[in-house]
Amino acid sequence: MKNKKIKLLLGDEAVALGAIDAGISGIYGYPGTPSTEIITFVQRSKKAKEKKIRSAWSVNEKTSMEEALGMSFAGKRAMVTMKHVGLNVAADAFVNSAISGVNGGLVIAVADDPSMHSSQNEQDSRFYGKFAMIPVLEPSTQQEAYDLTRYAFDLSEKVKLPVMMRLTTRLAHSRSGIKTFEAREQNRLDAPTESSRFILMPSNARGRYRSLIDAQSNLVEISATSGNNTFFEGEDKSLGVIAFGIAYTYLMDSFKGKPNPYPTLKINQYPLPNNMVKKIFDECEKVLILEEGYPIYEELLRNNIDLDANDNIKGRLSGDLPRTGELNTDLVAKGLGLDVVPEEELPEIVENRPPAMCVGCGHRDLYDELNELTKEIGDRKVFADIGCYTLGALPPYEAIDTCIDMGASITMAIGAADAGIFPAIAVIGDSTFTHSGITGLLDAVNEKANITVLISDNYTTAMTGGQSTAATGRIAEICRGVGVEEDHLKLIVPLKKFMKENVDIIRNEVNYNGVSVIIAQRECVKFYKKM
């Protein structure tokens, strides 16, 4: 039953409320823009508190995926959230969960970031969904984000597979009015009495993989009959349009309130509905493929039709749409051949301002200390990581040389030191250290690598909004447990008044032939009051 009250929600928040109303018992994840607000909404929700929904942050995406799978094993509904690059971290458990299948409904909400607003790449998570051979849902609007999330849990329990909910930045971080439904009760505890399918020894996994293959035809049939994929008739058969997710919204906006004259296939559920795809290709002279992200299905459709007909497919690969970045209404209009205002005629806007570390940030003083030492030692290489401190690459600091992925600072420093670079210095934040830096530090200790690790501990996950971190108050203890020698485990407070003694400490540890760790502890200036 629909509630009359309309809520103004972000796409992320619509997914979160959809999950609450679908009867989840737990939500797991690691903060990463543009997915963070999903769990944040649950943590702030009075309804979620009343239902005692578990909503603490996990250490990383892999652990969150496994924890959610454990709740599903117990028969209850669970959601796991992450950004697109976080799915790389969770991939082992994610792919294997499709082989084992699920018990209680399990939905993976992944937010992609085309145009790389806050990411290292713009990879498309639909690849992972196809790779794992599970259903994928992609909403066009915030209302669909809410509705499809509720549907996703029902679908997951129906087909006994995890289901991916794929969002993109623009939908995740824009608002719309949402009509909600009455919340469903949580599942009762109902762990399987026969659990061999969750034991992925080769003898079991082979049979499970065969079952997953056999399920594909049923998933295509469900996709075609679910009502989530819609074929709209059109009078002008010179062009057909296949629009995926939010690209359908851009398509309709491009007509500026006028009727869409072209046959259009709106896709919100994968696998593709083959009958509808065949219909649009049979009816139309050319077909425009609108995808937010990689040209995954444009490429697949090109490979699955007569090669002579490839010229009839328009999209990112044909040059009718940009190969990289987000779509928008103007780009879609251009792809349709509609008139748009030339860029040179658009009004001037404020010039972009590069991001900068906050005034009073402890990372600033740490980089000042590191750069002061550089005046003495000359050339040095600093391997940094994912966090606010990555901004140390920009003027006036220009203090770091690399930033690849979560945890890579320590391991890249090891490899560089092995190659003969000295000094090899790693800079990593507290949350990133527990996410994926600890294992690299263990490698360094085991190899007796000649590196210096600076852990910039601001007691929070600041870059994504000040979430709690598993490292608070325990970093030194963790380093000791990994095997860092007590004499080369130092604590400093990065402040101007301590600059001389801090530089002395860093100098001594850089000159030590082995693994040394310096923990620079100072509260995040932005979230100190909150903490």
Image: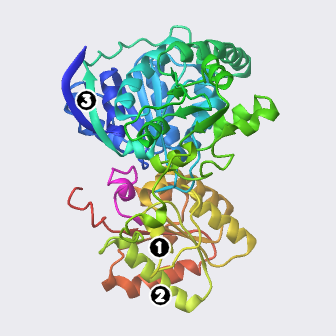
Q: Which residue is outermost to the bottom? A: 376
The answer to whether residue 265 is left or right of residue 329 is right
Residue 38 circle label: none
In the rendered image, the quadrant that contains the C terminus is: bottom left
Disc 3 marks a residue whose amino acid type is Ala
Name the residue that disc number 1 marks.
392
Name the residue that disc number 2 marks.
372
**Colour theme:** rainbow
In the rendered image, the quadrant that contains the N terminus is: top left
Residue 42 highlighted magenta (yes or no) = no
Residue at x-position 34% and y-position 21%: 22
Whether residue 352 appears in this view of the structure is: yes
Mark with earlier residue (1, 2) = 2
Labels 3 and 1 touching (C-beta < 8 A)? no
- Report the magenta residues as a range: 455-472
Above or below residue 291? Residue 276 is above
